[in-house]
């Protein structure tokens, strides 16, 4: 780590070598413990935001590399030129921006920048870009799987076609063989009958020849003459028989051959393949979110975010909860709801239609819950049992049990750390890497109350029902109350624009507070069905607000600007 970060800048200027413990981004230097005290008390620097050195050094390199002074004159930026869209030091203004009319003090430009429309818009753009990329990736994965199915189906179809062709050819072959054998049998029968007739004639001729031999040896001339006449008639008859065979073409050679049908010949010339592979494209199945195109926002005095007066609530659903004392609730992006019941010690997960999905029972009491979407873990506090549990929502098994040695109620998670309400022990942090516990803010908090986190801000309810906002390092940003309209505050949550929703258990209402903590108003009351509302949760993905009475009913509202 560079000595710039590890050494106290004030001491180093005095040639004293002391390690820094915090970093001031506005002064752009580290401070030791002693200088930190003077820095916090000094009128010129008491409003500066300081962070632990280790926390600052863990910022992305792109942030650490940003210089807060003019590289040309090495002076601090004091002016922002809207025309050139750049920050300027005082010498830059004199040298190159004298003719620029739209110059603003840099402090006015950066005021509330983290809650500006430009910052919120960038968060939304990055979120939607990530979601769209995930949708496209999943759509392409589905397409890859469908191509596999297409190939399998085509293979089956080709095989089926081949079987049909083979069966058809087998039938044609069988018919042709029958015809062949029938023709052979018919010709064989004709030839066989003819051979029989010829054999009879051959027998007669043989007998005639024998008779002539005997006549020649023993008969008288008269006998020979008369017998010869008789034999001549029979021989003539045989000659006529032979002539008829020639005349009737009965002794022509018969052969059997095969003449291919034209369709068969065409089959080999025209049928080059069994089919054609066709690639078709259609509109993608993945639905992408497409925010209305907005011009690039220059970080000038921030465009105001929607106010608490812009909030419009539409009741979407009323849900029947399970248990007699609902201490906390959580609304998942897929529409499911999680409720923890303090008295029965169980956690119920309801489907989007309000029916029970499943129930979880923990080893200790169940006070408050927080769902970590990235790891699909449910964090459960236990009130007086000094234990925080982490449950794998996929396996529904308690994966880890952390003994914090303190009472614990409201819980939130950010960057691998659990922040929880420790009642009189204040706001505490659990590092999940080593389960170490440290105090973030020493303050007396409201028992049974939730805490909330949004961007780099933490929100909690004090023991006197006042509401406090601090940064992630515990530095106070604003504090509201106590106010008469809010008594026994229990639930707290924050929407996409930094507006804070708090439920009043005794007053049976929900109050909304502006992002700067200066304005508040009554949002919902008993006439809306609230009866000792214990828990609230805002789903920033779907812009929905879940409110749970301590028993019986919970309500889901669609929230629009």
Image: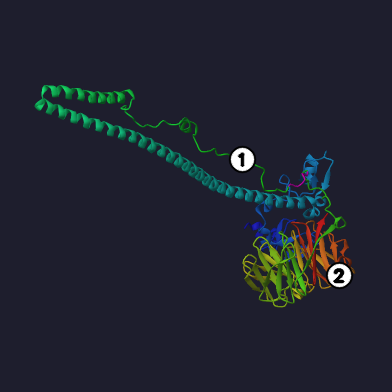
In which quadrant will I find the C terminus?
Answer: bottom right
Which x, y percent locates residue 536?
A: 79, 66
Residue 171 vs 340, above or below: the answer is: above
Q: Position of residue 141 (x, y in %)?
A: 60, 50
Main SS of residues in magenta: loop
**Spot occupied by residue 96 in the image (x, y as percentages of width and height):** 78, 39
Residue in the foreground of this view, choosing between 556 and 165: 165
The quadrant in which residue 337 appears is bottom right
Residue 280 is marked as 1
Are the two marked residues, 1 and 2, in contact with CB atoms closer than 8 angstroms? Answer: no
Observer-nearest residue: 189 or 230? 230
Please identify the residue farthest to the right as the structure is shown: 484
Query: Secondary structure under badge 1?
Result: loop
Residue at 23% over, 23% down: 233
Which of the two discs, 1 and 2, sits closer to the camera?
1
* Location of residue 32 in the rendering, given as x and y in whole percent from the top left corner: 70, 64
Which is nearer the eye, 439 or 5?
A: 439
**Of callouts 1 and 2, which one flags the residue occurring earlier in the amino acid sequence?**
1
Q: Is residue 477 above or below residue 199?
A: below
Residue sticking out furthest to the front: 222
> Which residue was labeled with disc 2?
508
Q: What residue is drawn where x is 36% and y is 35%?
A: 186
Element type where label 2 sits in the image: loop
Residue pictured at 49% horizontal, 34% vertical: 272
Mark carried by residue 170:
none
Q: In the image shown, does 395 or 128 lie closer to the viewer? A: 395
Can residue 87 be seen from the camera position used here?
A: yes
The relative height of residue 371 versus residue 66 in the rendered view (above or below) is below
Q: Calculate the distance from the C-alpha at mark 1 to the C-alpha at mark 2.
A: 60 Å
Count residues near mark 2 (Cα–Cα under 10 Å), then give few for <14, some for 14-19, many for 20+. many
Residue furthest toward the left?
217
- What stretch of residues is rendered in magenta? 290-294
């Amino acid at each position: 780590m560079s000595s710039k970060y590890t050494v106290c800048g004030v001491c180093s200027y005095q040639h004293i070598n002391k390690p820094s413990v915090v970093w001031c981004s506005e002064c752009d230097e580290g401070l030791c413990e002693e200088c930190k005290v003077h820095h916090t008390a000094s009128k010129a620097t008491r409003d500066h935001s300081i962070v632990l050195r280790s926390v600052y050094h863990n910022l992305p390199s792109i942030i650490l590399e940003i210089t807060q002074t003019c590289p040309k004159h090495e002076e601090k930026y004091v002016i922002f030129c809207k025309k050139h869209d750049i920050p300027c030091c005082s010498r830059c203004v004199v040298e190159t921006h004298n003719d620029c009319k739209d110059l603003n003090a840099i402090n006015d430009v950066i005021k509330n920048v983290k809650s500006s429309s430009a910052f919120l818009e960038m968060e939304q753009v990055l979120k939607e870009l990530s979601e769209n990329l995930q949708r496209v990736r999943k759509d392409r994965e589905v397409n890859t799987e469908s191509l596999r199915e297409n190939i399998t189906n085509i293979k089956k179809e080709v095989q089926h076609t081949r079987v049909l062709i083979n069966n058809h050819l087998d039938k044609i072959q069988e018919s042709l063989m029958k015809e062949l054998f029938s023709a052979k049998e018919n010709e064989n029968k004709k030839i066989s009958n003819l051979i029989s007739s010829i054999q009879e004639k051959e027998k007669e001729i043989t007998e005639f020849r024998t008779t002539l031999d005997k006549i020649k040896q023993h008969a008288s001339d008269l006998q020979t003459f008369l017998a010869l006449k008789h034999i001549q008639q029979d021989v003539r008859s045989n000659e006529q028989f032979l002539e008829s065979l020639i005349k009737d073409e009965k002794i022509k050679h018969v052969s059997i051959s095969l003449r291919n049908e034209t369709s068969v010949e065409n089959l080999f010339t025209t049928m080059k393949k069994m089919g054609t592979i066709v690639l078709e494209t259609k509109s993608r199945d993945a639905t992408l979110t497409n925010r209305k195109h907005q011009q690039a926002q220059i970080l000038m005095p921030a465009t105001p975010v929607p106010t608490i007066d812009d909030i419009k609530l539409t009741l979407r659903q009323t849900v029947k909860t399970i248990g007699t004392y609902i201490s906390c609730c959580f609304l998942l992006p897929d529409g499911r709801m999680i409720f923890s019941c303090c008295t029965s010690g169980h956690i119920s997960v309801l489907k989007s239609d309000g029916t029970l999905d499943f129930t979880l029972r923990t080893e200790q009491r169940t006070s408050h819950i927080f769902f970590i979407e990235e790891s699909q873990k449910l964090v459960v506090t236990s009130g007086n049992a000094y234990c925080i549990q982490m449950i794998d929502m996929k396996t529904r098994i308690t994966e880890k049990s952390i003994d914090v040695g303190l009472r614990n109620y409201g819980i939130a998670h950010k960057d691998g750390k659990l922040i929880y309400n420790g009642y009189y022990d204040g706001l505490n942090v659990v590092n999940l890497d080593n389960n170490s516990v440290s105090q973030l803010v020493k303050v007396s908090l409201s028992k049974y109350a939730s805490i909330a986190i949004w961007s780099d801000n933490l929100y909690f309810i004090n023991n006197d029902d006042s509401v406090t906002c601090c940064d992630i390092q515990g530095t106070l940003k604003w504090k509201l109350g106590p106010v008469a309209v809010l008594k026994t505050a229990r639930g707290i949550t924050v929407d996409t624009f930094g507006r804070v929703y708090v439920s009043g258990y005794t007053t049976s209402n929900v109050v909304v507070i502006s992002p700067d903590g200066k304005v508040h108003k009554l949002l919902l009351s008993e006439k809306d069905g609230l009866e000792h509302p214990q828990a609230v949760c805002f789903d920033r993905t779907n812009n929905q607000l879940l409110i749970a009475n301590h028993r019986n009913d919970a309500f889901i509202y669609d929230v629009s600007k």
